Image: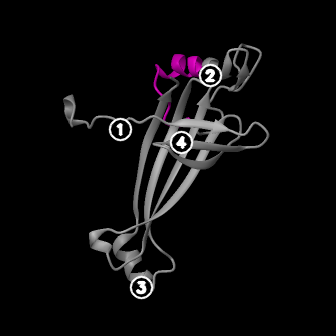
Amino acid sequence: TPQDGGLPSPLTFDMTLTRDTTSNAAWMTLSNLSREGTFDGQYFSNVAEATRVFTECSRCQMRMIERIDVAVLSRSQANKLAETFGGECPRNVLDLGVVPAPNDAGISAPGQTSLGFDAVRLCGFISTEVVADANDEDGGACDAKCSGCFLTFQARGERR
C-alpha cells in the first residue's frame, strides 16, 4: 500500500540471530525457518538458493539467490552512527571504516556484557538475483531470456 509520496510501505518481519560462541557459525531464523550464515563479531552474512519457476521462463530451470549482509551494532556504535548519519543506517555501512571501531573513547564492539549480548541494531542489505541454472539443457537461451534480474533492499533492524 503506497504511503504519502507514492513510496511503498516498508516490508517488516521478525528475525532472530543466534551464534556459536566458539566459531563464526551463526543462524538467522525467520518464521521457524533457520538458515546458517557466518558472524565474525561485527558482520552477519547468509546466502541461500532455491529453484523457482516463472511463467515466462517455464522451460528453464531458474534459481533465486538471496544474500543477506548486515553489520551488527553495539549500543555505542549505533549511537555514534546516529550522530553522524541522523539516525539512519548509512548506505555504505558495509564499507571498511564506516562502522565505528572499538576504541578508548567508549566505542565497543558487539559482545557479551553483564546485561546480556550488546547488539541493538542491524544495518545492511538484502539482495536477490534470478539466474538460469547452469545445468539447464538450454542454458544459453534461458540465460538470455530469464537471467539478470537483481534487486537490492536496504535492511535495518532494532533489537526488541
Q: Given this view, does label 2 or label 4 mark the residue nearer the observer?
A: 4
Identify the residue position indicated by label 1 in the image: 11
Query: Foreground: 118 or 104?
Result: 118
- Residue 158 visible within the image: yes
* Lower sequence index among marks 2 and 4: 4
Q: Do the residues labelled 2 and 3 touch (CB within 8 Å)?
A: no
Q: Which mark is residue 50?
A: none
Compared with 135, 12 (above or below) is above
Sequence-wise, which precedes: disc 2 or disc 1?
1
Residue drawn at x 72%, y 13% as measured from the top left: 105
> Mark 3 belongs to which amino acid?
Asp
Residue 139 in picture, x, y percent from top left: 44, 81
- Front-most of residues 30 and 43: 30
Residue located beneath label 4 in the image: 29
Instruction: Give the residues in magenta.
Output: 78-93
Q: Distance between the residues labelled 2 and 1?
A: 25 Å
Q: Which of marks 3 and 1 is nearer the N terminus?
A: 1
Q: Earlier in the sequence, mark 4 or mark 3?
A: 4
Q: Mark 4 against mark 3, which lies toward the viewer?
A: 4
Residue 153 at what x, y percent from top left? 42, 44
Q: Mark 2 points at which residue?
A: 77
> What residue would you read off at disc 3?
138
Quadrant where the N terminus is found in the figure: top left
Q: Is residue 80 magenta?
A: yes
Which amino acid type is marked by label 2? Answer: Gln
Q: Which residue is drawn at 69% across and 18% down?
A: 107
Helix, strand or loop at disc 3? loop
Task: Give the Cα distance between marks 4 and 3.
Answer: 36 Å
Q: Position of residue 23 (x, y in %)?
A: 77, 43
Residues tagged 4 and 3 counted as in contact (Cβ below 8 A): no
